[in-house]
């Protein structure tokens, strides 16, 4: 190529005391140097571009890693909080299990007391306090972190406690049903026991046993109790039963006898009026007559007797309750 054969003279002029220098440079060399310069500039520009691009990518990666690290720390923190919360809930369930067991024990004790109140034998169902059951009161102690073994033992014990509580509840349901039936039967039986005061008055004028007879002034046996009152006061049946006698006699005056079907009879004497008649079914607390002063009597009163299995008994050992509001 013709242009490559051309040459150029390069003149270097130093300061005034030195000689001028000339160099001949061919066009090919000059072109090559120019090309190398351009390439160098291009390489430098490309390197700068790639460096800046990589720097931005590194910054982006750093930000992503930082965000991921924060997210991971948050997840770890949430998991730790969740584990702590679950541990607290399991501990709470364990304490609830103890509380439920304590409540079941109190229910069993109450059932035993109810049986005693109505005269039903508890037998083998008598309850004692459960060993190890915490009582109410102050608590405290050092705070110690849970170990995996502590937690595993707590979970295992809690499962066992709830399993046992389930069985105890089923047993208690059956037991309470039996107790309920027994109480109902006992209540029914008690309705035939003369525990209700036959009068509103509680003024005793003569007791059961040996006394001086008010007419003969001799020592005689008094087979009941005398309760003072006003003529016309209501007389109540002391228990459920059937009227076997409703009549008048010279000594007993107007009088009523009731059979209570359990070997016990009650008698009500010196009445002013007979309301219940022979053969009537009467209920505990039902008005059967009115207080009076008939027969062998010195004044208005009720002579009340209890006869158990053919023998006269002290009525005061039976009389326990009164009508509501009386």
Image (spheres, grey):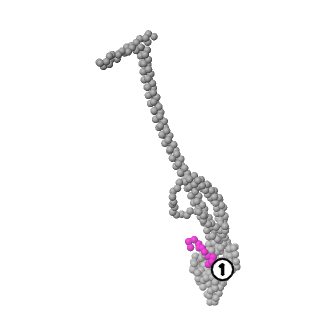
Residue 150 visible in the current orientation:
yes
| Picture coordinates of residue 245, whole percent (x, y) | 68, 77
Rendered position, 96 above or below 294: above
Residue occupying image coordinates x 53% and y 47%:
79
- Label 1 crowding class (10 Å Cα cut-off): few <14, some 14-19, many 20+? some
Q: Main secondary structure of the magenta part?
A: loop
Magenta span contains residue 314: yes
Residue in front for this viewpoint, 71 or 190: 71
Q: Find the residue positioned furthest to the left.
A: 16
> Splitting the image into 4 quarters, where does residue 14 fall?
top left
Q: Measured from the top left, where is residue 240 in percent x and y?
A: 66, 72
Quadrant of the rendered image containing residue 128: bottom right
Q: Which element carries disc 1, helix, strand or loop?
A: strand
Task: List the single residue furthest toward the bottom.
Answer: 217
Quarter that holds the C terminus:
bottom right
Camera-nearest residue between 64 and 185: 64
Q: Which residue is mark 1?
A: 313
Provide the residue span drawn in magenta. 313-326
Left or right? Give the position of 262 relative to 53: right
Q: Is residue 255 visible?
A: no
In the rendered structure, the answer to whether residue 27 lies left or right of residue 194 reads left
């Amino acid at each position: 190529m013709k242009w490559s054969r051309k040459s150029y003279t390069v003149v270097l002029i130093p300061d005034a005391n030195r000689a001028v220098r000339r160099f001949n440079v061919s066009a090919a060399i000059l072109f090559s140097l120019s090309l190398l310069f351009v390439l160098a500039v291009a390489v430098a520009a490309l390197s700068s571009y790639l460096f800046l691009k990589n720097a931005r990518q590194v910054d982006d990666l750093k930000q992503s890693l930082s965000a991921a690290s924060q997210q991971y720390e948050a997840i770890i923190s949430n998991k730790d909080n969740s584990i702590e919360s679950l541990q607290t809930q399991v501990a709470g369930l364990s304490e609830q299990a103890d509380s439920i067991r304590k409540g079941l024990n109190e229910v069993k004790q109450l059932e035993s007391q109810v049986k005693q109140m109505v005269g039903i034998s508890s037998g083998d169902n008598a309850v004692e306090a459960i060993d190890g059951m915490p009582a109410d009161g102050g608590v405290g102690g050092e705070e110690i972190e849970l170990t995996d073994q502590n937690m595993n033992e707590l979970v295992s014990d809690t499962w066992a406690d709830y399993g046992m509580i389930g069985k105890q509840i089923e047993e208690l349901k059956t037991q309470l049903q039996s107790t309920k039936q027994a109480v109902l039967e006992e209540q029914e039986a008690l309705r035939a026991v003369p525990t209700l005061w036959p009068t509103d008055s509680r003024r005793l004028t003569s007791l059961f046993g040996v006394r001086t007879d008010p007419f003969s002034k001799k020592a005689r046996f008094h087979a009941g109790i005398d309760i003072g009152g006003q003529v016309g006061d209501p007389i109540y049946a002391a228990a459920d039963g059937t009227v076997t006698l409703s009549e008048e006699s010279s000594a007993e005056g107007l009088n009523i006898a009731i059979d209570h079907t359990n070997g016990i009879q009650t008698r009500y004497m010196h009445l002013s009026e007979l309301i219940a008649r022979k053969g009537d079914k009467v209920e505990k607390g039902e008005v059967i007559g009115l207080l009076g002063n008939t027969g062998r009597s010195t004044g208005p009163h009720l002579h009340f007797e209890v006869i158990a299995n053919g023998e006269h008994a002290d009525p005061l050992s039976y009389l326990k309750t009164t009508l509501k509001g009386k």
